[in-house]
Image: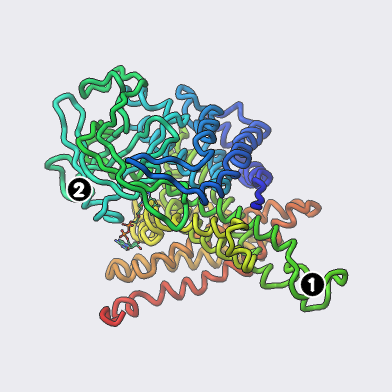
Amino acid sequence: MVVYKAPYDEYEFLFHEVFDVLDLAKRLGHEDLDRDFIRMVMEGWGNYCTEVLLPLNEVGDREGLVFESGEVTMPSGFVDAWKEGVEAGWFATTCRPEHGGMALPQFVRNGVDEIAISANMSLSVVPALGLGVYELVTNHGVQELIDHYGEYLANGHWCGTMCLTEPHAGTDLGIIRTKAVPQDDGSYRVTGTKIFITAGEHDLSENIVHMVLAKTPGAPEGTKGISLFIVPKLLPKDWKSGSVEGLSRELSDARNGVTCSGIEEKMGLHASPTCVLNFDDSVGWLVGELNSGMSLMFEMMNRERLATGMMGLGLGEIAYQNALAWARERRQGRDLKGIRDPSQAADNILVHPDVRRMLLTAKVNNEGCRALGVWVGTLLDQLHSDEDETRERAEALIALLTPVVKAHFTDLGCETTSTCMQVMGGAGYCSEYGVEQFYRDVRISKIWEGTNGIQALDLAGRKITQDLGRNLRYLMWPLAEFIEENRDIPEMAEFNKPLHKGVRGLQQLTLLMISQGMGNPHFLAAGATDYCRYFGNIMLAYMWARMARVCLEHPDSDFHQAKLASARVFFSRIYPETISLGANIQAGHKDLMNYPEAMM
Ligand SMILES: Cc1cc2nc3c(=O)[nH]c(=O)nc-3n(C[C@H](O)[C@H](O)[C@H](O)COP(=O)(O)OP(=O)(O)OC[C@H]3O[C@@H](n4cnc5c(N)ncnc54)[C@H](O)[C@@H]3O)c2cc1C
C-alpha cells in the first residue's frame, strides 16, 4: 500500500541550480564527475533502496527480530537484501578506492541517505554505522588495523557499532565503567556492559566490529580519561598474541568474549536490534591516542548526528508522499466556497484549507531541510580541500550546523509524520497505510546520538561561543552578503526582508544568551531548545531565499514556480514561529526553576 518516489529531480535542482556542486567537485579534485554520472549513481543506489529495501520495511516491522541463545535473526529477506547491497558495492561509494569505494563526494551520499531512510530505516542505519566505524579506523587506526578492517567495513562485508551507553551512563558518558586493561603484547582486554547498542548482534554479516569507549587503569576522571577501542565479535583465525601485524580476514569460530544478553522491545524500528552487549575480557586494540576516546568518538557521532538529521527528513518525506496520495483520493465535505465536483457526493479533501495547511507545512519543511542537507554535504566535502581557509570555514560551519541539523530535522520529522497521519484521519492510525510505522520509527531520532535537548545545549552553550564566536562569524558573512546582494531586487523583498529581520533577531538573541548565560547558566539552558529551533528556522529561511532567487529566473517553469509558492508558504506560515521562540528565550529560566519541585 505504501507509495514512494525518490526525489531525484529535487536533488538535481539543488545540486546544479542552487549549489553548483560540479564546480565544487572539480575544485576538490573530482574532475570526472558530471551531472549524468551523479544522477546515474543516485538512481542506481536509489533503485536498490526502493526495489529491495522498501518492500521489506513493513515485513521487518511486522515480523520483528528473533533473539535466541545470544543470537539475533533478522526478519525475512533482510540478509539477502544486505548481501545484494554488499555485492553491488553501494555501501562503499564514499570510501577510498583502495577499499573498493568510489570516493564519491559526501553530498551524493547525503542524498542517498535520505532515500535509504525513507525506504527502510531499520536496515539503513546499519551501513551508516559501518561507514562511521570505517572512517574512525581509516583516519585514526594503525596501518595493520586499516589493512585488516578497511575494505570489509567499507563494503558492508562486516558491520560496525558504536558502544557508548551503559546502564547508568547515557548522556553523562564521563561516568562509564567499562575497563580496558593493557597487555604486554600491545593489545587490551575490555570488560563491561553496554546497553542500547544498535546492530550489536545480528546475522547480516559474519563479523561485527565494535567501537567501544572504555577507561584504562589510572585514567583521569570523567571524559578526559576515556579511550577508544576496536573490539571485533570474532578475532582473526591466525591471531595468537596482541600483535595486529599481518592479520588474515579468515575468522576464528570462537567469539571474542562479546555476548548479547538481550534485545529491547521498542515503540518502532522493530527490525533494528537494540542490544545489551557484555564484553568479558574481550581482545581490543586502541584507536588513536590514549584518553582521546571522547573526541574521536565525537567525530563518528557528529557524522551520525548529521545522518540522524537525514532520518527526520527521510521519514518526513515518505509520510508526506503517502498522505498526499491518500488525500488526492479521499472525498469528504464540500469546498466552503461552493461545490467543486458536482459529479461526486463530496469534494476531494484537498479543497479544505486545513488539509492544505498540513500537507504544505510537511512539504515545505521537507524541501527546506533537503536544501540544508545538501549544503552541509558540500561542507563535509570541503573538509578535504587543499586550501586552509576553505577547510577552516567548513569546519566552523559544520560545528555550528551539526546540532541544528540533528535537532531541527528530527523535531520536524516527528511533527511531519504526525501531521501526515492527521491528514489521513483514522486510516493514518491504522497499520495498513504505513504512516503510523513512519511515526513510530522516526521518534528515536530525537533521542539517540545525544537527545535534542543536548544538541540545543551544545549549540547555545558551546558552538556559538567556541573560538570567540568564530563559527557564527563564518555563518554571518555569507548571510549578510546574500541579504545585501538581494536588497534592491523588488521580487526578492518578500523573502529577503524577513530573512534580514530574523538574522538581526538571531544576533540579538545570541548576545542575550551569552550575556545572561555568563551570569546564570540556567538562563542559557532554559532558552537553548527555543534558540536551536530559532536557528533552524533561520537556516531554512536562508535556504528558501536562495532557492527563491534561482526560481525567479524561470517564470515559465512549473517546477520553479511551485518552489516559489513553497517559499511563500515557508515565510508566511512557518517562519513566524520565530516571534514566539524569541519571546520564550527572553522569558528566561525563573518560572521554570522557581516552580516548587514537590508540586511538580
Ligand atoms: C533504539 C535505541 C538505539 C540506540 N543506539 C545506541 C547505540 O548504537 N550506541 C550507544 O552507545 N547508545 C545507543 N542508544 C542510547 C542513546 O544514545 C541514549 O538513550 C541517549 O543518548 C540518551 O541517554 P539516556 O537514554 O541515558 O537518557 P538520559 O541521559 O538519562 O537523559 C534523560 C533526559 O534528561 C536530559 N538530560 C540528561 N542530562 C542532561 C543535561 N546535562 N542537561 C540537560 N538535560 C539533560 C536528556 O536530554 C533527556 O531528556 C540507543 C538508544 C535507543 C533507545
Say which residue appears at 29% left-offset and 80% top-offset. Answer: 594
Say which residue appears at 12% left-offset and 42% top-offset. Answer: 218
Residue 18 in the image, given as x and y percentages of width and height: 64, 47
Residue 490 in sight here:
no
Residue 167 in the image, given as x and y percentages of width and height: 26, 53
561, 387: nearer the viewer: 561
Disc 1 target residue: 346
- The quarter of the picture where the C terminus appears is bottom left
What is the three-letter code of the residue carrying label 1? Answer: Ala
Q: Quadrant of residue 568?
A: bottom right
Q: Quadrant of ligand 1?
A: bottom left
570, 56: nearer the viewer: 56
Q: Estimate how packed mark 2 is, as few (under 14), some (14 to 19) or many (20 or more) residues with alpha carbons within 10 Å.
A: many
**Left or right: residue 281 compared with residue 540:** left
Q: Quadrant of residue 192?
A: top left
The relative height of residue 65 versus residue 459 in the rendered view (above or below) is above
Residue 40 in the image, given as x and y percentages of width and height: 65, 33
What is the three-letter code of the residue carrying label 2? Answer: Arg
